[in-house]
Image (spheres, grey):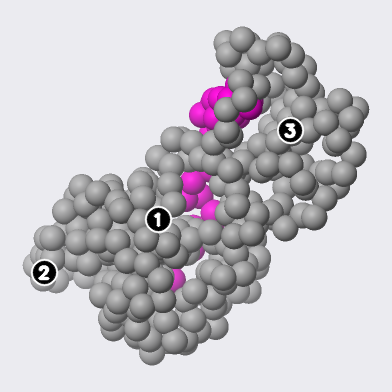
Amino acid sequence: MSVNVLFSARPALWPVYEPLLNTGLADAGIKATIATDLPPDQVDYIVYAPNGGLLDFTPFTRAKAVLSLWAGVEKIASNDTLTVPLARMVDHGLTQGMTEWVVGHVLRYHLGMDQHITVQDGVWAPDPPPLATQRSVCVLGLGALGQAAAQALAALNFNVTGWSRLAKDVSGVTCLHGPDGLRVALSQAELLVLLLPETAATENTLNADTLALLPKGARILNPGRGPLIDDEALLRALSTGHVGHATLDVFRTEPLPPDHPYWAHPNVTVTPHIASETRPDTAAQVICENIQRSEAGRPLLHLVDRALGY
């Protein structure tokens, strides 16, 4: 079998992905022409990232699928010119990176590391933290990333609740769903992790009303998507002390503007969208596997439901 694959992502990534994709497809027994510039009507698959510049999929009349390099597909899912199947990126490298960020910052909060690092005043004041079994953590979003993070926290004996739009069953995690489940989940979340996709339905999931459901002093971690949080509502909740602290990795505008209130707020930690990143070596494996599956007449992995937006 022979296929033509268009690579449409940041040009700087092409030298990294070219050998990985060529080797992976050859190992799968697929003869492939992979390039950054192919006649649109000759393209079978598009390896895609929104920052590659491709906006109009209409000329790609032979394309069988668009294979995204990003986990989030909000920048492409609503594109009316895209009529072929769209697969998002789910790979173990990205998942592992996200899990490490979430677990690291949950432990930072749980163990009171900020206080130990920033306050060195010569006062001996032993105040040991509770055990993980006495700490409630809630993960909003139980997709691949949310499930992995929740299970890693459960393995450390945290009391973990997970919430999703539809019912899920995740080993070691108390799973809730729907509007009523969200209220229950938030009401007991000492530490809250946001790993929902960005859709019209999830925008401002944390707003004045839902923030008020959190226990006083709750800590928030957002490595998911910036629009999940109503920023003004969060700043108000931080100013009153209802929310004790927030660690934010993603924002509505990135890079976060230098004059944004989050930078100077004493109860906000900003990390520059580093919670996880697509790793070319593992991402290329996923792309090659999906092309192999498609060519064998098998369903693609990680297909996006365009109606839901993820």
Q: Which residue is mark 2?
A: 127
Front one among 138 and 115: 138
Q: CA distance from mark 1 to mark 3?
A: 29 Å
- Kindly indicate the quadrant of the structure image that contains residue 30: top right
Q: Nearer the viewer, mark 2 or mark 3?
A: 3
Q: Amino acid at mark 2?
A: Asp
Do labels 1 and 3 touch, CB within 8 Å? no
* Residue 127 vertical position relative to residue 64 in the rendered view, above or below: below
Where residue 64 is drawn, which disc sits there?
3
Q: Amino acid at mark 3?
A: Lys
Q: Residue at x 59, y 60 (%)?
A: 308
* Residue 227 vertical position relative to residue 58 in the rendered view, above or below: below
Q: Which residue is mark 1?
A: 142
Q: Which residues are magenta?
A: 268-294
* Residue 295 vertical position relative to residue 30 in the rendered view, above or below: below
Left or right: where 197 falls relative to 118: right
Q: Residue at x 44, y 65 (%)?
A: 165
Q: Nearer the viewer, mark 1 or mark 3?
A: 3
Decide which of tag 2 and tag 3 comes sooner along the chain.
3
